[in-house]
Image (spheres, rainbow, N blue to C red):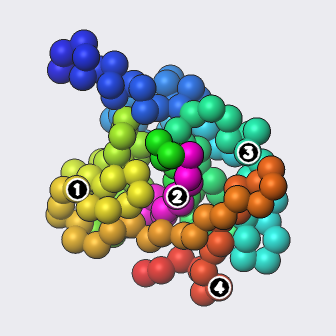
Amino acid sequence: MNRREFLSRIEGLSAGALACGAGLSLNGCIGFHYVTTTVSGNRVLINKAEFGTGRFALVEAPGFPLPLYLYRGDGGGYSAVSTRCTHRGCQVEPAAEHLICPCHGSEYTNTGRVLKGPAQRPLQQFPVEIEGEHIVIELPVGGEME
Ligand code: FES
């Protein structure tokens, strides 16, 4: 990897994630940016100010054993996906401008589309809305998809 590629990879990481390497498990990585949430029914609210200026944050949600990955795109819109790999359920990890599964190497876009298998299906996605100063993630009533 040359300097330009390295800097390109770093650019996509939030400030809170810089302390962690792409090869570390999120469970063992204390540097990733988790946001505080307010839960109301099946809605998870995140204060925009807490999301900060980074590109992503991890969100703990009721009924989901793994955090959700909340990403802010170039246009300022947000997307939220499960971090459960659709291949065999390992936790995917943020790595610059995409997500990587450490178990068998599947790769996903920041919005959950499969870039590289063995996973065949996209990550579970959740609608995201902006309401005033909050980013709102709508969870399915039935909880996490199998
Ligand atoms: S569990 Fe993610 S690639 Fe196999």
- The Cα–Cα distance between marks 4 and 1, rounded to whole angstroms, is 28 Å
Answer with left or right where residue 114 lies relative to residue 61.
Answer: left
Badge 3 or badge 4: first in the primary sequence: 3
Q: Percent position (x, y) of residue 42?
A: 72, 76
Q: Whole-Å distance between the Cαs marked 1 and 3?
A: 29 Å
Q: Secondary structure at mark 4?
A: loop
- Give the amino acid at mark 2: Ser
- Earlier along the polypeptide chain: callout 4 or callout 2? 2
Residue 70, horizontal then vertical, whole percent: 56, 52
> Who comes first in sequence, dot 1 or dot 3?
3
**Nearer to us: label 4 or label 2:** 2
Q: Nearer the viewer, residue 111 or 92?
A: 111
Instruction: Please state the extent of the stretch shown in magenta in the rendering.
Output: 76-85
Dot label at residue 79: 2
Q: CA distance from mark 3 to mark 2?
A: 14 Å
Can you name the residue that lies furthest to the front here? 75
| Residue found at the very far bottom of the displayed protein | 142
Mark 1 secondary-structure assignment: strand
Identified at 25% across, 17% down, the residue is: 4
Q: Please, what is the three-letter code of the amino acid marked with disc 3?
A: Lys
Residue carrying label 1? 115
Tell me the residue at 57%/70% (across/down): 127
Locate the C terminus by quadrant.
bottom left
Image quadrant in which you'd find residue 119: bottom left
